Image (cartoon, helix red, strand yellow):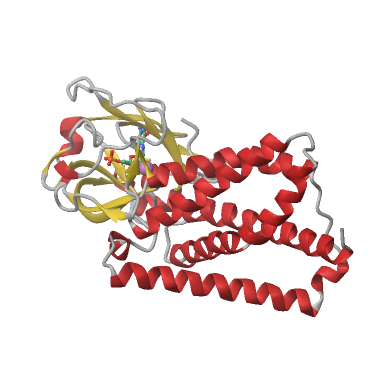
């Protein structure tokens, strides 16, 4: 085997490794970040995915040589490439709108599921088939090739967007996060979604209460008391599952329910189901505890008796069936970046 071919193969592997890391990191960030920055993160995510796709011909040659030597772990390598292929194709399917759902799962769920499943295999693959970077990997020629690859992926990105526009595929109507509109200002048509495995509880408003705890004590609010507030927020719920909806939410800004505090740093919001998120205390000015949407009480699925409206935060921040608010000294980021249940 020529040394040239070997080193070209090594560089292809190195490039793929970096692109995969970039794709995973930008995918995670795209879910974590609600600000305008998300548009650029989503674009970077798409470019990384397409660049991986462009390297497929080179990688196939390398993989073919590897498979002919039938080393241990060939099956894991094949499973790994299948998962990456599923992740990229379902990503393109979602972005263009060609693939809405397949077999009961949405394109976005398939995309995230395949990507997450590929992580342990990626770690194994990198450990078992080590690629060692060398100083010459930073040579001008390599930089030039990197530029050509990124340029190619930008061209592919543009071509795909052009195709979507010309053929008026649904993808043209997606938001900067990549989500599609579902039931805006028609709350009855908005999907009911859980992050992972939560279930919709039937809560009796008469016996339900919201407990607000802080260092200075505890206060319980009844549904009647909370429903009397008339704060209104127009906000967009953008689920990482790939849809969004804009609604008018009525309820009470959280700061109105809080006692005085000195040292506190965060607000722990707990759901009757055990689900919960922690927010920076300063967010209490914009966080709404909603009891109504579109002028009518919430449905059980959308969080009755009360749910959080977190403008600018992705759907998983919008805790439903809230029954506890805790003013705490714990910093808000002291939690898993994504809910675990
Ligand atoms: N208690 C609880 N609240 C939750 C969730 C959950 O699983 N449990 N899922 C979140 C997610 S991921 C989204 S997108 C929104 C969906 O709100 P909806 O069902 O009213 O559309 O609720 C959020 N609030
Ligand atoms: Mo979601």
**Please, is residue 95 above or below residue 137 in the view?**
above
**Please, is residue 266 above or below residue 145 in the view?**
above
Q: Quadrant of the N terminus?
A: bottom right
| Front in this rendered view, residue 262 or 321 | 321
State whether residue 259 appears in this view: no
Left or right side of 131 for 96: left
Q: What residue is at 24 percent from the left and 45 percent from the top?
A: 252
Across and down, in percent, residue 69 comes to: 80, 42
State whether residue 93 appears in this view: yes
Across and down, in percent, residue 242 comes to: 36, 49
Q: Quadrant of residue 269?
A: top left
Across and down, in percent, residue 159 comes to: 43, 72
Across and down, in percent, residue 215 comes to: 47, 34
**Please, is residue 157 above or below residue 185 in the view?**
below
| Front in this rendered view, residue 187 or 264 | 187
Q: Quadrant of ligand 2?
A: top left
Left or right side of 65 for 157: left
Residue that sits furthest to the left in the current view = 295
Q: Quadrant of residue 129?
A: top right
Please count the marks in the image: 0
């Amino acid at each position: 085997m020529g040394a040239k071919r070997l080193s070209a193969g090594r560089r292809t592997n190195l490039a793929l490794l970096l692109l995969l890391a970039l794709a995973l990191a930008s995918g995670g960030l795209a879910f974590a970040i609600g600000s305008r920055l998300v548009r650029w993160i989503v674009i970077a995510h798409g470019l990384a995915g397409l660049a991986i796709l462009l390297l497929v011909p080179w990688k196939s040659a390398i993989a073919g040589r590897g498979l002919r030597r039938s080393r241990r772990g060939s099956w894991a390598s094949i499973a790994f490439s299948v998962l990456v292929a599923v992740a990229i194709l379902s990503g393109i399917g979602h972005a263009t709108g060609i693939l809405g759902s397949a077999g009961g799962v949405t394109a976005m769920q398939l995309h995230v599921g395949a990507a997450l499943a590929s992580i342990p295999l990626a770690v194994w693959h990198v450990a078992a088939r080590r690629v060692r970077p060398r100083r010459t990997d930073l040579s001008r020629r390599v930089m030039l090739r990197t530029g050509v690859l990124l340029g190619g992926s930008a061209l592919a990105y543009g071509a795909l967007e052009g195709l979507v526009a010309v053929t008026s595929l649904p993808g043209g109507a997606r938001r900067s996060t990549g989500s599609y509109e579902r039931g805006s200002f028609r709350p009855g048509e908005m999907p009911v979604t859980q992050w992972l495995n939560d279930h919709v509880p039937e809560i009796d408003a008469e016996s339900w209460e919201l407990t607000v705890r802080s260092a200075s004590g505890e206060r319980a609010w009844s549904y009647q008391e909370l429903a009397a507030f008339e704060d209104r927020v127009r906000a967009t719920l953008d689920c990482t599952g790939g849809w969004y909806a804009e609604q008018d939410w009525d309820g009470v800004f959280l700061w109105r329910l809080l006692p005085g505090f000195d040292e506190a740093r965060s607000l722990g919001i707990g759901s009757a189901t055990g689900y919960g998120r922690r927010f920076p205390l300063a967010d209490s000015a914009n966080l709404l505890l909603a009891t109504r949407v579109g002028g009518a009480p919430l449905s059980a699925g959308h969080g009755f008796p009360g749910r959080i409206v977190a403008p600018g935060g992705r759907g998983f921040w919008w805790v439903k069936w809230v029954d506890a608010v805790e003013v705490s000294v714990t910093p808000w980021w002291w939690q898993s970046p994504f809910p675990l249940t």
